Image (cartoon, rainbow, N blue to C red):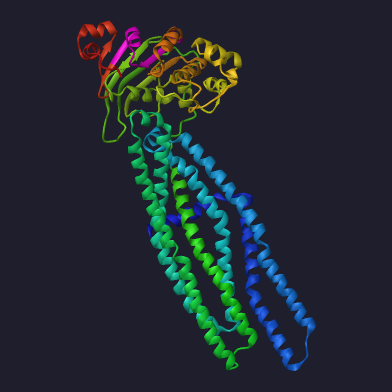
Amino acid sequence: MAKNTKKKGVIRRIASDVTGRDRAVFAGLIVIIGIAKLCLSIAPRLSGRITDALAASAETGDFDTGYIASRCVLLAFLFLIGYGVDGVVNRSMVRISQKLAKKLRNRAQQKLNHVTMGFLDTHPVGDTLSRVTNDMVSMSNSLESTASNLIGQLILVVGLIIMMLVTNYKLALIYLIVLPLGFSLTALVVKTTNKLFRQQNQTMGDLNALVSDSYSNHMLIKAYGCEEEKTGDFKSKNKRFYDTYVKSRFLSGFVIPLSVMVNNVAYVCLCIIGGIMLLNKKLTLGEFQAFIFFGNMIGSPLSSLSSSMNNIQTGLTAAERVYELIDEEEEPAENPSQKIVPENVKGEVTFSHVKFGYLADKQLMNDVSFTASPGQTMAIVGPSGAGKTTLINLLMRFYEIWDGKILVDGIPADEVLKSELRSTFGMVLQDTWIFDGTVADNIGYGKKGATREEIIKAARMVQCDSFIEKLPDGYDTRISEENSALSAGEKQLIAIARAVISDPKILILDEATSQVDTKTEALITQAMERMMEGRTSFIIAHRLYTIRNADKIIFMVDGDIKEVGSHEELLAKRGLYAAMYNSGTSMG
């Protein structure tokens, strides 16, 4: 019952999303389809009348040419209307369905721009991509090819049954008895396959997630010799998709044969009983022919209805997944009256008794407090899982703290618009992001409306202009994440130049030089120091030079700050930092 209710809810939402002129067009299409199918419903009875007229003419020898000719013209007109509107209806349905798909894709994209970081951290990219692409296409195709067809065939079935009753109610009872049996069997199969269609779409999402992950990290997979393991995972998920797909299609494949079988049973009964009535002169030849015509015609919409039920199931299941994404929780709406960051930000950052955890029942930070004075360089170190990146996530308000305060220049961060707060930061992450575009586009991304002069200046500051100018089209060379023309270090330099061009007041460098080789690192060290000069900087790093030169080092363990001080001060304490430093263990 819950699933039926859910399906009905999805149908209502699709109907509500078809708005304005499209809704009026769709209503008009239903009227046109109704008229067309009613014309087809009338055709068999008219054909029977023509047959009776011919039979009467054969008996009397009086051939009424005008009557028969006019009825034949009318019959041709009914067929022309009945089948001729399909092209117009199909074209309009394609436009309506694709416009709806476009609308929902835009909403899905907007949703992804506003979902919480928790959603992005916990949902596989491939599954989300599958919802926006495969499921969206499946839903629109179902609406495009099935909705109007389903409505049209229902109208045709009802129209044919009414005309049967009008022609001869006794013969019509055959279909009134047999057809409900066919629909009951079809409903039983549909109910059984509904769960399988859901599993099929979910498994496709899992498969896409695995493929996306594998191709994004194929170099690491090869480096660690994990090809067989990944191949095994792929085969396992591929087999699961194969099994669910085959089961769903196998069971749904019974729908049309069941429909045809029931229709054939009704057709045989019609021929036998109708033939007996004809011989006993309780039925005219024209009426008998009309019922044969009715029997032939009703078989097609019944089979089409059965096929449409399969397509509708697939489309509604896909629509469920699309709307699940659209309904995901968003970041809390911000108050427009919130403060904005002053233009002349000094860069003082304070954590005051901050408490936080990613899970409601598992607290990570218990009581984190420190102050970074304007222009200070803060190095954040500690073992893996200590909470270093979490501290940065909280500073940028990617996650909201449970308790305490984070202040920028004395202003509570939660009282500042996120866009305003983040505009004061420049961030370079360990995982370099290069999008498909020119080199200039990638550097200029850090500042809206950046000029070519500003882009070149930023590139020169981090000394990546030398290799950029050697590229085929210089700053206009197209690059992407998979572009093998650039090394990992060169991509990182471009990402650093992107941070430089934004002229941030506060810098966040999350292992920003980890992808840069020693030679390249030496070239940018001086530029990095110039960039940090006069700016508050937070550095998560392994390299010792950044730790030793930092004004203050924060040593974290299990989400809490254990030690704070300069490199020399912490070594003199001979505590946790000194033990890690002296042992040569990685600092991050």
Where is residue 493 shown, x and y percent of the image? 47, 16
Give the quarter of the figure containing the N terminus.
Answer: bottom left
Task: Name the residue at 34% across, 41% down.
Answer: 233
**Where in the figure is residue 300, as x and y percent of width and height?**
56, 69
Residue 196 sits above or below residue 350 on the image:
below
Residue at image coords 50%, 62%: 307
Rendered position, 534 above or below 163: above
- How far across and down, in percent of the image, does residue 376 sit? 38, 9
In this rendering, is residue 357 above or below 341?
Answer: below
Q: Determine the residue located farthest toward the left in the rendered image.
A: 574
Q: Which residues are magenta?
A: 531-554
User: How many numbered marks are there?
Assistant: 0
Asked whether the viewer can see residue 24, the reply is: no
Q: Which image quadrant: the C terminus?
A: top left
Does the magenta portion include 274? no
Instruction: Indicate the position of residue 318 as horizontal and vertical percent values.
Output: 46, 50
Q: Is residue 447 left or right of residue 38?
A: left
User: Is residue 364 among the parts visible in the rendering?
Assistant: yes
In this rendered view, identify the residue nearer to me: 178 or 486. Answer: 486
Q: Is residue 542 magenta?
A: yes
Q: Quadrant of residue 153?
A: bottom right
In the image, 240 versus 82, the foreground residue is 240
Instruction: Give the quadrant of residue 163.
Output: bottom right
Determine the residue positioned at 53% across, 79% down: 267
Residue 141, relative to residue 188: is it above or below?
above
